[in-house]
Amino acid sequence: MPAVGKKPSKVLRKLKKEFEDSKRSLHRLREKFADGLSKGLERKWVSRTNKAEAALREARVAAGVEPGKPEFLKEPNSNTPATGKPAPAGSQSHGKCKADKDLDTEVKSKRLKSNAPAGEPCEPVAKPKAKRRAVDTCDGEMEARKRAKHEFYQPMGLTNHKLACFSNVVIQTIGAATHDQNLDTLFGRPSIVETFEMTTASLRRCGKSSRLSTRQLKDEREKLRTKVKSSAAAGERSKVSVTKHLRLLLQDMKTASKDAAACPYLLQNVLAFGGPEQERHLREKMSGDSQEDCHEYFTTIMNALQVDPLAHNAAGVNALFELETETRDICQSDCGYKADEESSGLQTLIETSLKSESDRLCTGCKTSTIRRETTAVRAPQELVVKVDRLSFDQKRKRVLKSEAAIDFSPKDDLRVDGHRYRLDAVIMHDGTTPQRGHYTILRRVNNTWWLLDDDEVISVAQDQIKDGTNYGQSAMFLLKKGPDV
């Protein structure tokens, strides 16, 4: 309100003068701040200069372009109005790397000096090699950022709807084996995956942390299983394809996220209830409602991939774990009978039962026994080793688990028949039997070890990767093949 006894015009002039003084003071403060900020940023720029930026400056010098300040330190254009509005469209080149912007700026300045029309060619600004070098440097910076992001990759956990820890550790093992692989090469192109009208929210409601009542939770699970069984009975193989659901889950697990966990519930139900009728009684117990053996689940899911009619290229997944062997039967008498046989399959199926002596009779003389020799022809890319800790106590009539510690070190490489293998993951089991206890997995990602306990992911020190710790005893190893010795 205007002051009493003064004319409105005088009040307005006074307010205007105060406003202009405030603007000048603000402008002086901005200049001081910009000057101090500029000096500070210049010091930071020099201290953070890396090899890529040094190469970029060399390329600009070779091109005849004088190195200048970074884009954010340049003075604003004098023709730009001080209204804070953006420059007209076309005045800046967006979506380009820094090298291209600098070179385009130099082209415009030299065209102005030579008064050359915009449509006609002007004198070259940079040599082709220098320009390519500058662009390659920017590409190198982008690759460096990608590598840095990859180096800090944290694996994603998996939700556990009930007692599915044995399934989660096997899926994590397959994820570790395919982490550096192209999923399109292993599984084929991605396609539409049937979700049986289950949203992400409804899938998470089936988890152990669900707030639903026991009856509601049971109804949600039965609804999904009924749809899976109906699709399998109707021969809708596309909806119950283990290959398609596993590929989708592995793709989700490749997305690094510290606060999220992937949901394997669809895959677990498709594997348990969506297969052929003659094998259903063996797979239904693998749904995660009861505790089972992790190695048995690994064999089940690998066999499902092998027989999946929609797995056009899923043999690529099995090939990662396959071991080619050659078996020779030699008669122990003088009949001279010999027979060679080549086979390939999951290397975990090769047990100590592959002994040299056999109780079978010779096919030639039918009187003497044969000696069987088995040798490895091709070592697998991913070597899965099962630790058999179970034995049957005749007196107690129960299965016992050995807790003997196995001496393994993630620092040392394992050499097998001229091949070098590195420990990439180890499944741990804490409990007395496979039906009593809990599975976790220790997994290596870019030389960093992680403990994956269902949806909980924790980094661990390398010296903690051993038997007898808080994680239990080793149950299965994943070894990645390296350069041959």
Image: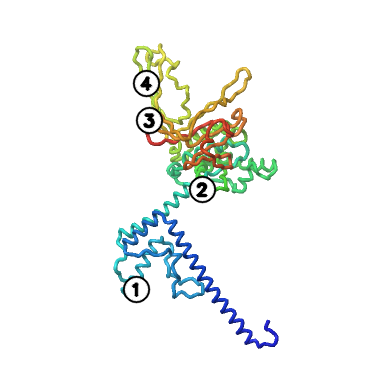
Q: Nearer the viewer, residue 347 or 142?
A: 142
Q: Give the amino acid type for the residue marked by disc 1 in the picture.
A: Leu
According to the picture, the residue beneath numbered tag 2 turns out to be: 255
| Residue 10 locus on image (x, y percent) | 63, 87
Measured Cα–Cα span from mark 4 to mark 1: 86 Å
Left or right of 192? Residue 209 is right
Regarding mark 1 in the picture, which secondary structure is present there? helix
Q: Give the amino acid type for the residue marked by disc 4 in the picture.
A: Ala
The local crowd at label 3, few if under 14, some if 14 to 19, many if 20 or more residues have their Cα within 10 Å, is few
| Above or below, comparing residue 441 to residue 192 in the picture | above
Q: Sequence-wise, which precedes: disc 4 or disc 2?
A: 2
Mark number, residue 418: 3
Q: Sequence-wise, which precedes: disc 3 or disc 1?
A: 1
Q: Sequence-wise, which precedes: disc 1 or disc 2?
A: 1
Q: Give the amino acid type for the residue marked by disc 2 in the picture.
A: Thr
Quarter of the view holding residue 484: top left
According to the picture, the residue beneath numbered tag 4 turns out to be: 339
Regarding mark 3 in the picture, which secondary structure is present there? loop
Measured Cα–Cα span from mark 2 to mark 3: 35 Å
Observer-side mark, 4 or 2, equals 2
According to the picture, the residue beneath numbered tag 1 turns out to be: 112
